[in-house]
Structures are given as C-alpha cells and as structure tokens.
Image: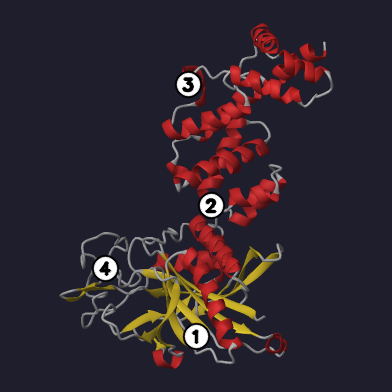
C-alpha cells in the first residue's frame, strides 16, 4: 500500500472584455480564425503590452476568495516558449513574485471531515493560440493568444481522485460565483493538470516524496478522476515490480482510457524565466485590495452555513443547494415565494427537481419551471388539493411544458378525491367484490388493510386522499 500525494494546477480563462495585454476582444469562441488579433498579440516588432486592469482585479478577487495573501508588489516574467501558437517566442507569466499566494480552500476529505487544500499561488498569465493540424499541414489561429489566464496551483494536499474531484467542484463554484470564469470546460475555459506521486509509509515518515508524474490538458473533472485512478494503478504496479517511476509529462487518452507519455518533464530552468522588461511591476495598495474585497459576493461555504443556520436545512441539503450560484438563487427565490418551512422546498429541489435535471443532463436554468411555480405546487400539496405522489407527476409535466401547476391539475382533473360519500361508495363496492379477503382480514390477517387501500387508490387513479381512504377502509373492515 502506498500513500497517494496529489497536487493540481488549474488554468482558468478570466471573463474580461479584452485580452491580457492588448485591446482585442477576449470573447473568441467560434470567431473566425485570426479575427481577434492586433500588433501586440501577433508580436509584430515594436508593439508593447499594456496590463489589463480588470484582469488584475479579477485575479485579486479570486485570490481573496481563496484566502490568499495579496502581494503588494508582484512582477510579470517571460517564460520562454518555442511553439508557433505564441508568436513572441515567450509567454508573459508570473514566476518569483506572483499576485496571490499562501491561501486555502475547504473540501470534504475522504474521511468525511473538512479538509484544507493549500493554495500555493494564483497568478496571471496569457493564453496561447491554437495549432490546427490537418492533412495539408498545420494552420495557426491566434484569436486565443493573449487571453488572460488565471493559474491556480495547490499544495500536494490531496490523497485521492475523489478529493481532487471535490476540490475542482468547489473551486469552479467559487470562480463562477465571483463571475471570474464561466466554468465551461467544453469550451476550454478551464483546463486541469494533475501531479501525482506514490510513497511508502517509511518515505512519508521521513518527509520524502516519490517521483512525480504530471498529467496535462485534462478537459473534464471526470478525466481528472479517471486519470488519477489509472496512474495510481500504473505506478503501484511499477513499484511493486521493483521498478522506478519515471518523471514524465503525460496526457490522458479518453478513448483508450489510459495515460500516454508526451515528453520528459521540463524543469523551470528550461523555461529560462526572467522579469518582463516591457512591463512595470504591479504595486497594489492595501486600501485598493480592501476595496476589491468589499466587492466579493457571498461565497458557497458562507451561503451553505446560512442555509443551515437561518433556514434550518440539513448540512447535506445546504451543501447541495449552495454550491452552484444559479441553483442557490433559484432555491432561495422558491423558498421566499413558498413562505413555509424552507426545508420543505429543499426536499423538493434536492429530490424531485435534481432527478429531473439529471435526466435532462441540464442546468437549472434549462428547466422551464419558475421558482414561484414550485412554491405553488407545494402549497397545493399542503392544502390537500393533490397528494404528494400526484405532485411529483405534476412537477414532471411542469418541466415538460412550463405550465403552472394549478393549470395542469385543472386541465387533467388531478385534484385529489376528498369527497367522503364518493370514496365510501368505492370502498363499499370493493369490499362487496372481495368477500374472501374481507373474511381473512377479520380472521386476523390485518396486513390486508394495505391491499384494500391500494385497490381504492387504483380505482381513483391515485387521486384518493390517502388519509381519508385509510380511515374509510378501516372503519368498514373493523366495524
Ligand atoms: Zn491583440
């Protein structure tokens, strides 16, 4: 058995209007190739970069939300990079003096307890363009070159693929809540890198680490979890066989479901970092940082705590509802419209509504159900107009049609049958038709009560008021 040691790097595109060092639009998704370029991001001679103030502010907001120290003095650095998708021949990044450092984020550890994942640094850099390899050769699209990227590097604090997954879910929720990143992994707005090593208990006791392998360009959280599982297995087999793990950079092959070696690992010397001479150092005053801090919205952990403390939700429901801002906003609006115990609304959202979302593979905004309509539905159940089971069916139809619940109940005649005389007739007819079962019940087989109730519910198409049905059946059988 080996101890698993995992650190993560995340590259997140910042939601700014313009690129990091020029005024080209940063919204390049599906734009025609090389339509968002200028002398700066094309690296034409004599062009000089200018720092995007909004990108600095967004990075500081993310740093504060991740409990980081914000450096009063930080510098940009050149990282030498010899691929055609960045025509300068270097990437402007930060190296020795990053903007944010020494923070942490809280996740649920594998033991169920809260666990702090250290944030070593969060810094600003620029994205590269794209090389598009085709049959006739390689084409270059530089639209993405120079888009601001926030790089967040953790300490090696995670011990499993599940912990890494929970870290990413929490981090994405924070960045989305801040409006710093879209979280849209299909569009490449977030890219992950895992570094993973195994060590024996003796190595751990001596403070030593095993050889670290990097897995780059992971485009989904699932790929992160799967590649970690694969690497743990692979490295365990190497070590068990008496071999040594090689220090390499790998990629994840989604089709073959395995990691593949891309190249031997560069060290920071290979990048030959040096301070960027075309840009001044960033000096941030304490007062300005505090002004930025005042713009932070309520973050997921704080919101979950409020859901427990003020709204009386269970910690589990609060966690489920507070993580994604859109879900949390939707829930709060529904709870406000309902006016009764918020816990009741939480049950419907985490139960029925989440089940519908999963079936649709969608996000909450994709459902045509308005928060006020869910509140109205719960009120119909509370008032006894429909029973809970019918309520679930009505919710499905609300999701399919976007109609309010009262209209669905009315149009389909779903209102619960609470008419005592009518129900009594159904019960009497049923008992008359099943004399054997009645006799068995009266001879002591009282479990048949449930069967009789089921028959009445069937007869009323599930719309009989269950309390009243139970009462009538019992009255007649026992009387
Ligand atoms: Zn440009």
Q: Which mark is residue 407?
A: 3
CA distance for labels 2 and 4 = 30 Å
Left or right: where 257 falls relative to 236 = left
Q: Earlier in the sequence, mark 2 or mark 4?
A: 4
Quadrant housing residue 232: bottom right
The quadrant of the picture showing ligand 1 is: bottom left
The mark closer to the camera, 2 or 4, is 2
Q: Marks 3/4: CA distance?
A: 50 Å
Q: Position of residue 292 (x, y in %)?
A: 52, 62
Can you say which quadrant of the picture contains the N terminus?
Answer: bottom right
Q: Residues within 10 Å of mark 1 (few under 14, many from 20)?
A: few
How many dots with numbers? 4
* SS category of the residue bearing label 3: helix
- Residue 105, x across and y down, in percent: 61, 67
Foreground mark, 3 or 2, reads 3
Q: CA distance from mark 3 to mark 2?
A: 31 Å
Residue denoted by label 4: 143
Q: Nearer the viewer, residue 377 or 229?
A: 229
Residue 155 visible from this viewpoint? no
State which mark lies toward you, 1 or 2: 2
Location of residue 179 with respect to 347 vertically, above or below: below
Residue 192 lies left or right of residue 130; in this view the side is right
**Which of the two discs, 3 and 2, labels the residue nearer the N terminus?**
2
Residue that extends furthest to the right in the rendered view of this protein: 444
Near-viewer residue (283 or 441)? 441
Disc 4 is placed on an element classified as loop
Q: Which residue is mark 1?
A: 96
SS at mark 2 in the image:
loop
Q: Is residue 334 left or right of residue 86?
A: right
Give above or below for 229 relative to 466. Answer: below
Q: Residue at x 67, y 39 (%)?
A: 343
């Amino acid at each position: 058995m080996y101890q698993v040691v995992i650190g993560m790097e995340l590259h997140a595109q910042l939601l700014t209007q313009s690129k990091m060092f020029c005024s080209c639009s940063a919204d390049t998704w599906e734009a025609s190739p090389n339509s968002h370029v200028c002398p700066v991001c094309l690296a034409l001679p004599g062009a000089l970069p200018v720092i995007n103030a909004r990108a600095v502010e967004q990075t500081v907001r993310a740093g504060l939300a991740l409990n980081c120290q914000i450096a009063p003095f930080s510098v940009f650095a050149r990282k030498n990079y010899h691929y055609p998708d960045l025509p300068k021949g270097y990437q402007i990044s930060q190296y020795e003096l990053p903007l944010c450092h020494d923070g942490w984020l809280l996740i649920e550890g594998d033991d169920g307890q809260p666990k702090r994942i250290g944030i070593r640094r969060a810094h600003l850099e620029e994205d590269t363009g794209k090389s598009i390899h085709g049959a006739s050769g390689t084409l270059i699209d530089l639209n993405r070159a120079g888009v601001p990227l926030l790089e967040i590097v953790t300490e090696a604090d995670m011990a499993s693929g599940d912990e890494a997954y929970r870290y990413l879910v929490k981090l994405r929720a924070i960045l989305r809540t801040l409006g710093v990143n879209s979280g849209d992994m299909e569009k490449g707005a977030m890219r992950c890198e895992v570094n993973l090593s195994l060590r024996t208990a003796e190595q751990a006791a001596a403070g030593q680490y095993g050889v670290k392998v990097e897995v780059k360009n992971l485009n989904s959280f699932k790929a992160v979890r799967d590649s970690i599982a694969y690497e743990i297995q692979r490295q365990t087999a190497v070590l068990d066989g008496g071999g040594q793990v090689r220090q390499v950079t790998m990629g994840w092959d989604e089709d073959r479901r395995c990691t593949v070696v891309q190249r031997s690992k560069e060290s920071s010397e290979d990048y030959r970092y040096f301070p960027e001479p075309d840009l001044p150092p960033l000096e941030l005053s304490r007062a300005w940082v505090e002004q930025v801090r005042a713009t932070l919205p309520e973050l997921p952990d704080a919101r979950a705590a409020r859901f427990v403390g003020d709204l009386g939700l269970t910690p589990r429901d609060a966690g489920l509802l507070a993580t994604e801002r859109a879900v949390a906003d939707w829930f709060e609006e529904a709870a406000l419209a309902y006016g009764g115990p918020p816990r009741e609304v939480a049950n419907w959202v985490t139960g029925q509504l989440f089940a519908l979302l999963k079936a649709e593979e969608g996000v909450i905004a994709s459902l045509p159900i308005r928060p006020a309509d869910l509140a109205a539905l719960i009120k119909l159940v509370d008032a006894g107009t429909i029973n809970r089971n019918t309520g679930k069916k009505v919710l499905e139809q609300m999701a399919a049609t976007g109609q309010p619940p009262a209209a669905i109940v009315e149009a389909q005649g779903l209102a619960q049958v609470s008419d005592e005389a009518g129900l009594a007739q159904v019960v009497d007819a049923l008992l008359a038709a099943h004399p054997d079962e009645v006799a068995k019940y009266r001879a002591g087989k009282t479990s048949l009560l449930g069967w009789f109730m089921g028959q009445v519910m069937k007869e009323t198409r599930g719309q009989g008021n269950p309390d009243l049905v139970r009462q009538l059946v019992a009255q007649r059988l026992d009387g």
